[in-house]
Amino acid sequence: MGFLSARRAQKEESRDFDAFQSIAAQVVDVMATAGVVLDLNNNVLRASPGAIQLGLVQNRRLIHASLIKLVEKAKKTSGAVQKELFLETGLRRDKVWVDARAAQFGGEYVMLLVDDRTESKQLEDTRRDFVANVSHELKTPIGAIGLLAEAIQGATDDSEMVKKFAESMQKESQRLANLVQELIQLSKVQGARVGENSTEVDLAAVITDSVDRNLLLAQQNNIRVVSSAEPGTVVLGDYEMLVTAVRNLIENAIVYSNPGSQVGIGLKVVNEVAEISVTDSGIGISETDQKRIFERFYRVDPSRSRETGGTGLGLSIVKHVAANHGGEVKLFSQPGVGSTFTLRLPIDTQEMP
């Protein structure tokens, strides 16, 4: 009787555990995160679609040594173990940042959960870099203004030196004002959802307004600005945002052009895409610089940027404005010949974010 009872209990225990395995398998299959169930020999018994997509499993084995090490640690621990790891996945060996947790269950199995934190990690790194860059950019003119103020105090008897220091202080103040203004503009265009408040915008009017806002700068630099844009090319979007983008492109062309030269602005439609092109015959941009030209605070010629008060944010703002309107910005440039920036905006804006 005791033997029969033991066998019955054993069968019930086995049936309960089979049911537990089935439930565990179903849970793994519907996981949004990457989940893997392994036996004590590290054979993969079940892997979620997320685990397959992330490239954690191959031929029913884990393929990352760091994850295997975490699983081995879980076998020797009563609770769950957790670690943040960098993994290389796929044929291109893409690097991903993950939060991995492993725990033993049932005495014979290990559950491994892996959350892909790459996007949040990149966002965190971007924010940290942005804060560091802003701090550096603000520190430079603020420090210069402080030193100039001290210099003025020490040169009260020399009117010429006071005048010279005051002019330099005014220049640094303007540089600081430009930086703050462009930081405000960048914050407005980053992540803005234009589609929610879009209106019909005539791109010829955008170009005219953008040229007008650069006339004084063009006169100061002895640059002739020529535009050719017929009214009637209309897109849905944010008028002021588009003016900011085109104005930045024209300003950039003026600043990096040689005195006495010309900046041209044109508008045409190609395959339901409106193209606003700004062309200069300035110093041009090398292939190396072209790869980074749209990065925040990146400057092709730092010395010229300091001289003109450039912040290194203008082209980054243009890129965000284009993306907010479902478009893009293209660059063609040859060193010593000049550059053409083209803002491309879809006429059919149903796909606009």
Image (spheres, rainbow, N blue to C red):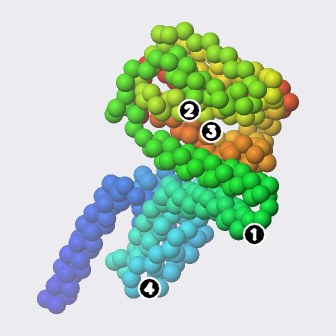
In this figure, which residue is indicated by the disc labeled 4?
Answer: 77
353 or 9: nearer the viewer: 353
Residue 300 position within the rendered picture, expressed as x and y whole percent measured from the top left: 76, 43
Q: Is residue 305 above or below residue 255?
A: below
Residue 119 position within the rendered picture, expressed as x and y whole percent measured from the top left: 50, 55
Q: Are marks 3 and 1 in contact (CB under 8 Å)?
A: no
Marks 3/1: CA distance? 40 Å
Q: Is residue 149 visible?
A: yes
At x 37% / y 28%, what residue is drawn?
A: 198
Q: Secondary structure at mark 3?
A: helix
The residue mark sitting in front, 4 or 1, is 1
Residue 325 position within the rendered picture, expressed as x and y whole percent measured from the top left: 47, 30
In this figure, which residue is indicated by the disc labeled 3?
Answer: 315
Disc 1 residue type (three-letter): Gly
Characterize the local packing of mark 3: few (<14), some (14-19) or many (20 or more) Cα atoms within 10 angstroms: many
144 or 315: nearer the viewer: 144
Sequence-first disc among 2 and 3: 2
In this figure, which residue is indicated by the disc labeled 2?
Answer: 245
Sequence-first disc among 4 and 2: 4
Disc 3 residue type (three-letter): Leu
Disc 2 residue type (three-letter): Ala
Residue 154, labelled with which disc?
1
Quadrant position of residue 64: bottom right
Q: Secondary structure at mark 2?
A: helix
The residue mark sitting in front, 4 or 2, is 2
At x 23% / y 77%, what residue is drawn?
A: 13
Sequence-first disc among 4 and 1: 4
